[in-house]
Image (cartoon, rainbow, N blue to C red):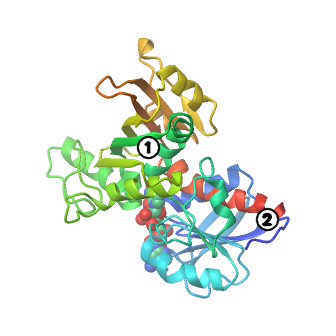
């Protein structure tokens, strides 16, 4: 349990990665009450210096002993690092907020989006899981609609940026774009196929039903966060040559009637959601507009006339911010509010 304190000792695990860099920026931006900070990464980055809150901090190698005196450990260094090191952080007395999928479906680990289920933070065993980026933006937008009209079924197709895979994938899209424009063969290392000027209908590995792990995450995590495993979800997750922000086409069937105007009003009044929806002026959310912003943007809200109570919409958010670092830091802020009472 986190104690009430003026300032907290914070560890950023994976501090040099795509999410870790964003963590550092958002901690600064939001003036998180940091006392001491420890930046942790692999041996490859040890000794590198990063600027943080006006100080120069040396990156250290992550070890089992990295967490002495740490109150809050923000993990974004991959699932196997979380599995190996999060228990050591907890043993040392830290509360872990983990960005990987390692603990998300564990019964005693809350899976939290502060706008949706902050109450889940009341019971934890030292580890809080941050959901998958595509799931976070979808549930932030849909929660007020579920409360009002009860969601029965969701059909979602995602258009996910390469930064969702991390720093190496960002570099791969840069490199391949140059290669293709220069009439050279694109070399694919991170993805199984060329991502530049292409769409890959595969994120992570396939299971025996030919769904990917990412698709199942959207199904199971949505049910766990919404606290309702009767919501039927089916997903197709696609990687697209966009650097930043995930976009989603979402079809929702409700138990009760709800009009597009009612849905827009509910979402506009909901924390963390911005409705950006005026087709007559070509206004709808775009990845290029949402990059670097905190909100979840919704547009193209319209009736699905093929079912009784159906709506279609388009949801866009910055996967590195609300989809990862920002949500993790909001969880930590909520833990602090809970501790301070
Ligand atoms: N990108 C997203 O939108 C997103 C969204 C939600 C969740 N996540 C999750 O966040 C985690 C990090 O993702 P990312 O996109 O930031 O990846 P990334 O850019 O590849 O960064 C990985 C980070 O982990 C560190 N790391 C790798 N191996 C390590 C080891 N053996 N010991 C210590 N540190 C190690 C790296 O350090 P070095 O620089 O020293 O290699 C780097 O800081 C993943 O679990 C991912 O699933 C990502």
Given residues 326 and 173, the one toward you in this image is 326
Q: Is mark 1 within 8 Å of ligand 1?
A: no
Q: Which mark is residue 245?
A: 1
| Left or right of 67 in this view: 239 | left
Figure quadrant of residue 328? bottom right
Q: Position of residue 40 (x, y in %)?
A: 57, 74
Is tag 1's residue or tag 2's residue first in the polypeptide sequence? Answer: 1
User: Seen in the image, is 315 located left or right of residue 206?
Assistant: right
Which structural element holds mark 1? loop
Mark 1–mark 2 CB contact (< 8 Å): no
Q: Is residue 116 visible?
A: yes
Tell me what residue is drawn at x 53 percent, y 55 percent: 227
Q: For this view, does 155 lie left or right of residue 256?
A: left
Q: Is residue 262 above or below residue 138?
A: above
Work out which quarter of the rendered image holds the N terminus and state it.
bottom right
Q: Relative to 127, does residue 87 appear above or below in the rendering?
A: below
Rendered position, 58 above or below 309: below
Q: Is residue 317 left or right of residue 241?
A: right
Q: Position of residue 110 (x, y in %)?
A: 57, 65
Q: Quadrant of residue 80?
A: bottom left
Location of the C terminus by quadrant is: bottom right
* Circle 1 or circle 2, nearest the eye: 2
On the image, the x and y values in percent for residue 137 come to 49, 45
Residues 202 and 18: in front is 202
Q: Between residue 101 and residue 225, name the one nearer to us.
A: 225
Identify the residue under disc 2. 339
């Amino acid at each position: 349990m986190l104690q009430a304190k003026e300032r907290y000792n914070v560890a950023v695990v994976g501090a040099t990665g795509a999410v870790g860099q964003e963590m550092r920026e958002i901690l600064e931006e939001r003036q998180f009450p940091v006392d001491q900070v420890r930046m942790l990464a692999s041996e490859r980055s040890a000794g590198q210096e990063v600027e943080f809150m006006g100080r120069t901090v040396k990156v250290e190698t992550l070890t089992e002993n990295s967490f002495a005196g740490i109150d809050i450990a923000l993990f974004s260094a991959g699932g196997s690092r979380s599995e190996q090191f999060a228990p050591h952080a907890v043993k040392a007395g830290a509360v872990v907020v983990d960005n990987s999928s390692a603990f998300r479906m564990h019964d005693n680990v809350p899976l939290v989006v502060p706008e949706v289920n902050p109450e889940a933070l009341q019971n934890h065993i030292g580890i809080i899981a941050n959901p998958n980026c595509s799931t976070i933006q979808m549930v932030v937008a849909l929660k007020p609609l579920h409360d009002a009209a009860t969601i029965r079924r969701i059909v979602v197709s995602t258009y996910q940026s390469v930064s969702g895979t991390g720093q190496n994938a960002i570099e791969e899209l840069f490199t391949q774009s140059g290669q293709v424009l220069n009439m050279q063969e694109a070399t694919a290392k991170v993805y199984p196929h060329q991502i530049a000027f292409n769409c890959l209908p595969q994120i992570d590995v396939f299971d025996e039903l030919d769904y990917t792990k990412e698709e199942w995450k959207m199904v199971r995590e949505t049910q766990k966060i919404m606290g309702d495993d009767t919501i039927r979800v089916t997903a197709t997750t696609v990687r697209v040559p966009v650097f930043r922000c995930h976009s989603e086409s979402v079809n929702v069937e409700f138990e009760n009637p709800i009009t597009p105007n009612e849905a827009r009003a509910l979402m506009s009044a909901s924390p963390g959601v911005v409705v950006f929806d005026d087709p007559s002026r070509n206004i709808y959310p775009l990845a290029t507009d949402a990059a670097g912003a905190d909100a979840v943007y919704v547009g193209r809200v319209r009736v699905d006339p093929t079912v009784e109570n159906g709506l279609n919409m388009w949801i866009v958010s910055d996967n590195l911010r609300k989809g990862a670092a920002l949500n993790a830091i909001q969880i930590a802020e909520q833990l602090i509010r809970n501790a301070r009472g």
